[in-house]
Amino acid sequence: MNFDDIANIPAALCVRCKGNKLLCGKNSCPIVTKYYASANLILDTRSISGSSPPSIFVGSFGYPKVRIGPAVPPVTGNTEIFERPDKWVGLKIEEISRMRFSLYRGYKLIPVKEAVSPGNYLSEVHDLLLSSRPVESSMLYSSPEKKLDISPETQPFGPGGYIRSFDHESSSSNSTIERMYYDTDIKASESVLLLYDSTSLYTIEKMLSAGMLGKEKGRRIVPTRWAITATDTIISNGIFSELKGAETVEANLFYHYRNIGNEYYILISPGPYSFEVIESWNNGSIWTGVRGSSTEGDYEDWKRFVREPKIGGSFFAAKLVILDHLKRKGKIGRIIVTRFIDGEYTIPLGVWQVRENIRKALQHEVVLEDIERYFSIVKERKALDVRQFSRTYRMIKNQTKLAEYGV
């Protein structure tokens, strides 16, 4: 790709689009197209065999008919880590991308409502996901393709294509998810909340995506990236309901962590619930390139929840982890997350890294004297005064002024 392809596109537009919405008006994202070319992955075989972690892919194009099917690496053995982002913290971005791009996708086109009464193929996909361990699987392609799947919400996948056949060995089932799969009298949202205490979040996402949860007549296949956001939202809302009436934190709690080109500065301060995420994509990051930086954010409080954040699914991923952290404290508060992304983040890996990096940050708590110190730390380290972008800061300052006048 020539830089001329994006030189006249505002960096802020690319940051908001992230290759998904084609806001620039082009037929395909030139940034993603460049990555396809540089990855140089060629599917030169008509079949793939290996141990599925287990893994599936559900696309969104063509909805309410979607592409759904298994993902299989050409390796055998314990491949569980391929689908466990909670175990990826500390890995290099090259290691993660190499692992994920080795997951070859296979799919058939199916109406989302088929989850109500699964046919043979969808039943085989469900059976794969019920497994308690990686499953020996094989796919025979009818029309393979070389294109990767890269999305700001989902973990990347390798090449894929329509498949003629899919086979896998029988395996023992995970009893917890099997029980929820066969319970067709409970809502999908309730199933997600019941599973959360004992089941990997990433397994729950896949079950929801494959149409394996919910009341029988209401079950639907859900595109992977939608299922990720839905899972985060359901759990976040459930935790928030439990925290209603909780006391506020008593101090300004500060957390920080950096990993694979993403750096997080988090503050939980005394006061009624509010949640704000500010993202700064810096010069050299994947969506801005050399065009400069772009900063944007979203804010909510207990009166108004954000439904469609400008920054995308990372808002819900961050919210889930921090509310979960506050649930263990039995407290609530004002929350600010400032995320900086730089040139080390060479490809989008999905919102899992927001979730897991913040989880890591929350392991190290420091008490600050006041909220001003938080913004000072960010400015000292990142040369950006995020007060100008923070609605939380403006709200606190306005309340302070009103209090001074006895209002």
Image (cartoon, grey):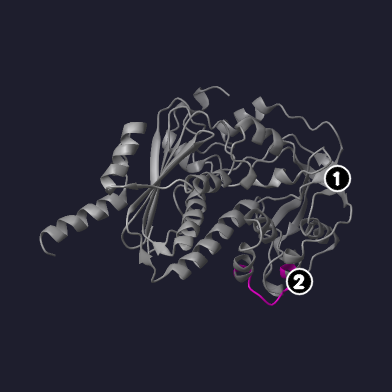
> Is residue 303 in view from this perspective?
no
Report the side of 91 relative to 144 (left or right). Answer: left
Instruction: Give the class, few, some or many, for how many residues have Cα within 10 Å of label 2's Cα (few <14, many ≥20).
Output: some
Report how many numbered discs are placed on residues in the image: 2
Q: Residue at x 27, y 48 (%)?
A: 370
Above or below, 230 against 364 in this view is: below
Q: Position of residue 22 (x, y in %)?
A: 53, 41
Q: Which residue is mark 1?
A: 139
Q: Earlier in the sequence, mark 2 or mark 1?
A: 1
Q: Residue at x 69, y 60 (%)?
A: 207
In the image, is 338 to the left or to the right of 82?
left
Q: Tell me the number on the disc at residue 182.
A: 2
Q: Who is closer to the viewer here, 251 or 185?
A: 251
| Residue at image location 46% in from the left, 47% down from the top | 311
- Amino acid at pointer 2: Tyr
Quadrant (top left, top right, bottom left, bottom right) of the C terminus: bottom left
Query: The residue under label 1 is which amino acid type?
Result: Met
Question: CA–CA distance between discs 2 and 1?
Answer: 27 Å
Q: Nearer the viewer, residue 233 or 318?
A: 318
In the rendered view, does 287 fall on the left or right side of 199? left
Tell which tag, 2 or 1, sits nearer the viewer: 2
Circle on res. 259: none
Nearest the eye: 45 or 50? 50
